[in-house]
Amino acid sequence: MRVLVTGGAGFIGSHLCARLMNDGHEVLCLDNFFTGSKNNILALLGNPRFELIRHDITEPILLEVDQIYHLACPASPVHYQYNPVKTIKTSVMGTINMLGLAKRVRAPILLASTSEIYGDPQVHPQPETYWGNVNPIGIRSCYDEGKRVAETLMMDYHRQNGVDIRIVRIFNTFGPRMAEHDGRVVSNFIVQALKGEDITVYGDGSQTRSFCYVSDLVEGLVRMMSCNGFIGPVNLGNPVETTIIEFARRIIALTGSHSQIVYKPLPSDDPQQRQPDITLARTTLGWEPLVPLEAGLKKTVDYFSGLGAAS
Ligand SMILES: NC(=O)c1ccc[n+]([C@@H]2O[C@H](COP(=O)([O-])OP(=O)(O)OC[C@H]3O[C@@H](n4cnc5c(N)ncnc54)[C@H](O)[C@@H]3O)[C@@H](O)[C@H]2O)c1
């Protein structure tokens, strides 16, 4: 099949492209390189089944493809708050453009939505039936509300035009090729630990997150795309929850670092708890994460050490 991956040069997108190439598909990787990089897909460049298209999805594009994985959107607060108007344009206009393409070529389209659509959840853990608690006017809204509109657009194109859609709500995912300075907790802590710098914990560290290793996530995306008749939304994430402070201590132990933990004020609208309910993914996709946190963290630490984060 000829598969389009928007945001294919990003962290998750690059792993997905590699997986799809491995499965024997032709892959069209579309990216504007805002947060992605050619380094992420270096191993795929030169393969005749792989094509790289530099394009911004806020502009329409005509392509002949059989499947669309729609991942293009900056995902970390540092990046999506850099140009919030552009972020919401990417989610709204970008998703309209990709849905238009899916409609024209009759290809199934999968949206990489996010657990952030649940906002600061008042239901814990979050099932797909929970509508969320999102601040519509805060500094995270360009991302959270952008993705909520993207989900709405997916549903409306499905109901109105019969577009074959899949909506996946991704929870915190980590692994090699995360951007080094994107402010996400996993990359932050690992880079700080490797450099022997203070590890910054925002708030008192009692807030929880659950971290899914990228290969598990990619398996979930592929299963969702091949699952006919189930459009989601479906949560994909690792339900094993850790507090941020526990997580910081784990990284220090794993890297053998002498870093100290320092505390800084919690940014506004930072969710207190985040844990997926993955019952639906288990029952409909037969999916659950298999890579233990420790094993995934080791691979990620090796990746950042290889980049010279310790120097
Ligand atoms: N990593 C996570 O923990 C996580 C969690 C929830 C949801 N997601 C979603 O998964 C997707 C991929 O996330 P990621 O972590 O790989 O982030 P990333 O920033 O590494 O990847 C996003 C990619 O999209 C590209 N992009 C951004 N705007 C674009 C535009 N206008 N046109 C074309 N390309 C554009 C970037 O250059 C980058 O390559 C995103 O949609 C994100 O919202 C990720």
Image: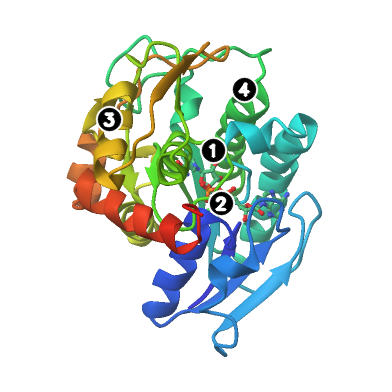
x and y percent of residue 215 in the render?
Answer: 33, 58
Q: Earlier in the sequence, mark 3 or mark 2?
A: 2
Q: Earlier in the sequence, mark 2 or mark 4?
A: 2
Q: Secondary structure at mark 4?
A: loop
Rendered image: mark on residue 71: 2
Q: Earlier in the sequence, mark 3 or mark 1?
A: 1
Q: Which residue lies under the disc numbered 4?
A: 140
Q: Secondary structure at mark 3?
A: helix
**Vertical order, 191 against 133 (above or below):** below
Choose mark 2 or mark 1, whichever is in front. Answer: 2
Choose mark 2 or mark 4, whichever is in front. Answer: 4
Q: Which residue lies under the disc numbered 1?
A: 155
Mark 4 crowd level (few <14, some 14–19, many ≥20, 10 Å Cα): many
Which residue is found at the position 40% from the left and 40% from the top? 193
Choose mark 3 or mark 2, whichever is in front. Answer: 3
Choose mark 4 or mark 1, whichever is in front. Answer: 4
Q: Earlier in the sequence, mark 4 or mark 1?
A: 4
Mark 2 lies within 8 Å of ligand 1 (Cβ measured): yes
Compare residues 253 and 10 and report the one nearer the observer.
253
Q: Which residue lies under the disc numbered 3?
A: 249
Location of residue 128 (image quadrant)? top left
x and y percent of residue 68 in the render?
Answer: 55, 61
